[in-house]
Amino acid sequence: MDRINIKFYDSLNKLLKKERRDKELSLELKLRQSVKDLIEALGIPHTEVGMIVIDGKREEFSFILKDGQKIEVYPAFNDVEEPKFQNLINYPKKFILDVHLGRLAKYLRIFGIDTLYENYYSDEEIVKIALKEGRVILTRDRGILKRRVVRYGYLVKSNESKEQLREIFLNFDLLPKIKPFLRCISCNGIVERVGKGEIIEELEPLTRKYYNEFFRCTMCKKIYWKGGHWERMEEFTADFLNKYNKGDIWKN
Ligand SMILES: [Zn+2]
């Protein structure tokens, strides 16, 4: 039986089973097995891989492995402030999230990041929209990311939503892209200033009485004003950015 040796570097080890981490693995090859198939059989979606080196030479995912080859696999993402490996892929700064990441979607929208999310999206729809619109798929599900057609994807590692936000900021270098309150939290539409006179009929009596500055989503028409909800969002963004810039890991 043909065998190969494979070693995973850095953060990729966290995606392997415990007993396989941080060591060179000697594995049996299947007939005409591509390096993509081998890596994904070990639980690592191809979207998490930044570079593959086989016998000292950089190769593609479709490379068919042969007996005795030595494979080195480097991560696309690092989850650390000072990555050892430069990510060679130029990722778009727009995203589509799977159905389990609703809170992360809201957080990204608060910062004005283009974020599609619907709790009824199927995996097929997510993949289709991502390809059509050039979006990065964010998911906790490795299965979606193993699909061959998926170009940009990221496996969200934390299950705590603010820590997830930190992961995305770090790995996609979002800080220069943020524009708090540009987007509607409900639908991702662009929010614009609107005159009080234009919307006065839609306001509750107390809102009408106490507030004068209003904004409206150009898509779903939701109205925003600088009341308690707005202030909580401002606090959230300030608090997150403060911790992020200090390099603190988010703990509630
Ligand atoms: Zn909206």
Image (cartoon, rainbow, N blue to C red):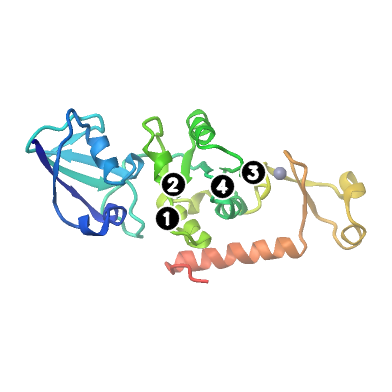
Residue 188 is tagged as 3
Q: Is residue 222 left or right of residue 54?
A: right
Q: Amino acid at mark 3?
A: Asn
Label 3, secondary structure: give it.
loop
Mark 3 lies within 8 Å of ligand 1 (Cβ measured)? yes
Q: Amino acid at mark 2?
A: Asp
Q: Amino acid at mark 4?
A: Ile
Of the numbered discs 3 and 2, the one sitting upstream in the chain is: 2
Residue 177 x, y percent position in the rendering: 52, 48
Residue 47 x, y percent position in the rendering: 35, 41
Q: Residue at x 15, y 32 (%)?
A: 65
Of the numbered discs 2 and 1, the one sitting upstream in the chain is: 2
Mark 1 lies within 8 Å of ligand 1 (Cβ measured)? no
Q: Quadrant of residue 145?
A: top left
Residue 170 is tagged as 1
Image position of 223 with respect to 125: above or below: below
Badge 4 density bin: few <14, some 14–19, many ≥20, Cα 10 Å: many
